[in-house]
Image (spheres, helix red, strand yellow):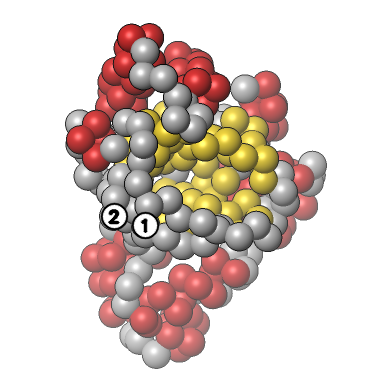
Amino acid sequence: MRQFVEKEQLFRPIEAITDERQANSVGVAHSHEWCQLQYATHGVINVKAGNYSFIIPPQRAVWIPTGVVHQVNNTAPASYRSFHIESKLGDKIGSDVKVIQVSPFLRELIHRGCDAWQGKYHMSDINSALMTLLIEEIHQAPISPLHLSWPTDPRLKRVCELLHDNPGDNRNLSELAQYSGASVRTLNRLFAKECQLNFTEWRQKLRILTALELLQNNRSITDIALELGYESSSAFITVFKKHLNSSPKAYIRNLTTV
């Protein structure tokens, strides 16, 4: 694993990072005094930021405001692209962590910026204009629901970590309550308060986000469905379509043609 070296300052309003990440790469949790946009041109990255966990395919990017602790991991190879953006530019985009949808135009701006904004580049008129367009496109991009709230209460966190490590675990909330040390009523209240979802919705979203990673590895739909705790591939496909408006096969086909 490469050694992580934190920057001490930005030399330009926006600085680009490009990286080809090997399978099973684990990043270092860190924060900095500027904002960041994280994106994968190929593959899927897993971004943990604040109290959220995000699975980011090439049609999405994650916005990280100033000071938010974050970490980037990936299970399969990924082409990683990122912008470090000074706070006064990032203020327009907002102070909340969010996943945005990447339009074809925004994708081209990301590619252009990653080519042009490496090191202490020249601040030309065209670079200034491209930066203005980039910030405006990020600001106006639709927000995607591809995220999972992560709890802070140790009892609920114990349950969520158990399910995260084994999303195919089909135990009901009563059984998991015994493991957590909290009552079913307390866990229901904590899910609503800390995750803004009920237990069933949270586990369903966890499984869909996990599926996005598994779909990269040429696994069959049936194998993925069974690993995630579904009784059949048709049940998995139904839930997948509900969340992403696409079948798993169509989704991964679009993923490889981005």
Identify the residue shown where x is 46% and y is 62%: 29
Any mark on residue 92, and which? none
Please give left or right for residue 65 compared with residue 244 in the image.
left
Question: To which residue does mark 1 refer?
Answer: 31
The quadrant in which the N terminus is found is: bottom right
Relative to 230, is 178 above or below?
Answer: below
Identify the residue shown where x is 36% and y is 41%: 10
In this rendered view, identify the residue nearer to me: 142 or 113.
113
For marks 1 and 2, the one nearer the N-term is 1
- Residue 30 visible in the picture: yes
Q: Are marks 1 and 2 in contact (CB under 8 Å)?
A: yes
SS for dot 1:
loop
Identify the residue shown where x is 37% and y is 57%: 31
- Identified by mark 1, the residue type is Ser
Identify the residue shown where x is 37% and y is 82%: 155
Q: What is the number of callouts on the image?
A: 2
Label 1, label 2: how far apart the Cα atoms are: 5 Å
In this rendered view, identify the residue nearer to me: 236 or 111.
111
Any mark on residue 67, and which? 2
- Identified by mark 2, the residue type is Gly
Q: Where's residue 243, x and y in %?
A: 48, 39
